[in-house]
Amino acid sequence: MGLGALGPALGEGYIGGKAMEGMARQPEMANTLLRNMIIADAIAETTGIYSLLVAIMILFVV
């Protein structure tokens, strides 16, 4: 589970950092960047959720 959560955590941190850089450079685009960042974070988080589901299945099924 830990390795399955590492990738999404790094990806979400990278997405958030780049969004903050973009907001600092173009404050008028902050709303658009925030919306896109939240969508990208949700997509990146699905990998962590899938790894959690696999870990639970291995724990209880196998």
Image: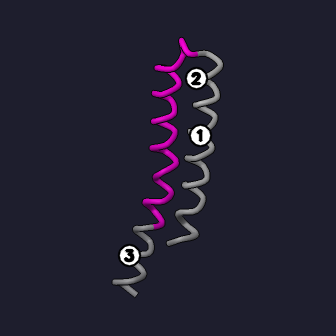
Amino acid type, label 3: Ile
Q: Is residue 33 magenta?
A: yes
Expressed as whole percent of the image width and height from the top left, the position of residue 45 reads: 47, 51
Q: Quadrant of residue 7?
A: bottom right
Expressed as whole percent of the image width and height from the top left, the position of residue 56 reads: 38, 75
Q: Which residue in the protein does label 2 denote? A: 23
Q: Nearer the viewer, residue 20 or 3?
A: 20
Which portion, as a residue range, is magenta?
A: 27-51
Q: Which residue in the protein does label 1 denote? A: 15
Q: Nearer the viewer, residue 29 or 40?
A: 29
Expressed as whole percent of the image width and height from the top left, the position of residue 12 reads: 55, 47
Mark whose residue sits in front, 1 or 2? 2
Amino acid type, label 2: Met
Q: Is residue 54 above or below residue 31?
A: below
Amino acid type, label 1: Ile
Q: Residues within 10 Å of mark 3 (few under 14, many from 20)?
A: few
Expressed as whole percent of the image width and height from the top left, the position of residue 37 reads: 51, 34
Q: Secondary structure at mark 3?
A: helix
Q: Is residue 60 left or right of residue 20?
A: left
Q: Are marks 3 and 1 in contact (CB under 8 Å)?
A: no
Give the mark nearest the N terminus, 3 or 1.
1
